[in-house]
Image (spheres, rainbow, N blue to C red):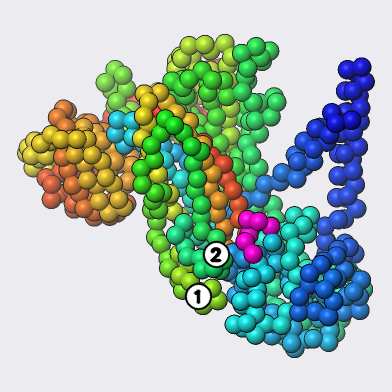
Amino acid sequence: MRKYIIPLVLLVAFNINAQILAPIKVEFSSVKKGSQAYEVNIKVTIEKGWHIFSQYSEQEDGLGPLPTLISFQDNKALTFKDEVKEKGKLIEKYEDVFEVNTKYYEGSVTFVQTVQNKTDKPIKLRGTITYMACKDGQCLTPQEIKFEVFLN
Amino acid sequence: MKLHLLVIIFFMTLICYSQNKTVLSSGSKPQIGNFMPEFSLNNVTFYKDSSVSLKDFKGKWLFMDFWFTGCTTCIKSFPKINDLQRKFKDDIQFLMIGVNAEKYGDPENVYKKLAKKYELELVSAYDSILQVKWDIWSMPYIIVVDPKGFVRGLTSGTDFTDQNLMDLIKGNDVVFDDMTVNRHKYEIPDVDFNSEKSGPLSNDSLLIYRSILTKWSGQAVSGTSLEKYVKRPEDYRREGFKLSGYPLAQLYKLAYWGKDIYSAFFLPEGVLAYPYPVIRVSNDHLFQVDYKNMSGLFNYNLAINSLKNSNLDKVMKVFQNELKTIFEFDVCIEDIKMPVWCIVEKSKNALENLKTKGGKEKVNVTPVSIEMQNVPVQYFFDRIIYELYSPDRVFISGDNLGFSSNIDITLNAILTDFNDTKNALNKLGLDIILLEKEMKCIVIKDPNPMGSQ
């Protein structure tokens, strides 16, 4: 009987796997910066009225908005330089209910990661960005977008 | 025996599928005007009973208010909801539901803290199933259930006032902002390039050629150039050349130049070419781009299994033919005078003065500075162009001054600000000027009724 379980599980998993994304547009690209050094750019364009949080938005004891999280799949051929930088107009706002400084972006923000390719072959870099978008009166549940960028 | 097994699997999956369907169609999700689906919750706090279900609230208005820990808006609304609960305690029962799925942290702990600080007395439960089951995707999400058990509102609660809640209780029609209206706007499907029919071509695949063009429906925007695609390792090439969220003009650009380029560039024969197509068609609605309404944008996938060796010309030809077949426009390459921005030497020997003193190649770029050591001048120019990019400001790419030595340079300027960058370049003896140059352009025209060309 065990054999029949597999397709059932697969099918259920497939049905649940709904995707919901916020009012943002995300563009992934890479720019060559030097010999085998690349900048991975994750450009997020945010619809008017909405905002998404910085990776460095504060959380205190479980209180505070969910910071944006960017992660890259481990790749032995790559060295990651520094942390993921943010290019955009950062807005800081103290939220009394949370007692923390929230940091967020409106309009647009670009997340930038510098990587060094240790080989001379083109490499596919995979990763995810998880973010929460809010506007006045409403926050969307945290969403995850998978991406892949070619370094060549 | 094998066939037998397959038949069973087939029926099992069929049953499973139809079951899922019936559950949905029988209204397992709360819908305005329908009867509220059954639910039960355990571990309810600030209430006389520790477990509750729908029937416990019959005869009273029930407001089920979903929230999660990171949701600023939800938490900011607590004092207001608490206030409303006090005022309407005889007629309305608020039931706060903190979503306690792992990724949301611990709402119970958060609520306790807030309850202390704001003297909250809201009935509070914690659950991770209902949010998923009822497809709640934005919070606060308040389900308004009338005393008979009918769903009367699915709302964020931003427009709750003493007055409209009073009206509601009195039996008047009150319309709250409806969370379900814009639901579709926030759904972004995957590009359908990964199903069985459109996934990577295997070595022994029967499929030898595939070209899929779909309208963009909000997927993550991504893509590459044909030039880069053909240089990829074969495994990656089997996935096909993929673009998503590209305007039609960009598709033509890729098909004819092979590059995903935004500046004027030199063709192999040394002639200058303009990146964007010149559109000369009587009805250009296909070229009008609107990300919000998702019009004028496309997803494209091209895979050719017979393409064992990298061959840019061939892939470009195929792509060009596809565009002709689908959109019918005629395309030709013409010499046209176009305005173009150019980085030049303002004072003589400006670049000579920047000549590198040697040392390790170093690049450090921040939003307000560029610091480079021992790099080709083209790196520096391309960086400036990249930062100042806008669709109506086309530059000549890279090394147009014929300066072959590497340079050391430090530029302090807000890199996205044109004037600031121009001023900073002036200080180094460089300048950005607008020229008019004859360039090779991709021209898109209405199809010639007499046949091609």
Q: Secondary structure at mark 1?
A: loop
The chain under label 1 reads A
Q: Answer left or right for B125 relative to B358.
A: right
Q: Nearer the viewer, residue B219 or B448?
A: B219
At horizontal 83% and vertical 61% (from top left) the residue drawn is B30
Direction front: furthest residue: A2
| Residue B120 spot, x, y in % from top left | 67, 82
At horizontal 89% and vertical 30% (from top left) the residue drawn is A1
Place residue B4 in its image quadrant: top right
Up the image or down, B160 lies above or below B392; here it is below
Place residue B163 in its image quadrant: bottom right
Amino acid at the residue labelled 1? Glu
At horizontal 90% and vertical 74% (from top left) the residue drawn is B56
Q: Is residue B275 visible?
A: no
| Residue B233 spot, x, y in % from top left | 48, 20
Q: Answer left or right for B238 relative to A74.
A: right
Amino acid at the residue labelled 2? Pro
Q: Secondary structure at mark 2?
A: loop
| Residue A135 spot, x, y in % from top left | 57, 65
Instruction: Look at mark 1 in the image and give the residue it sits on.
Output: A99
Check contact, mark 1 vs mark 2: CB within 8 A: no
Q: Residue B103 in magenta?
A: yes
Q: Nearer the viewer, residue B286 or A115?
A: A115
Number of labels in the image equals 2
Quadrant of the snapshot with the N terminus of chain B: top right
Up the image or down, B324 lies above or below B203; here it is below
Q: Answer left or right for B390 relative to A102.
A: left
The chain under label 2 reads A
Place residue B77 in its image quadrant: bottom right
Instruction: Look at mark 2 in the image and give the residue it sits on.
Output: A65
Q: CA gap, disc 1 to disc 2? A: 11 Å
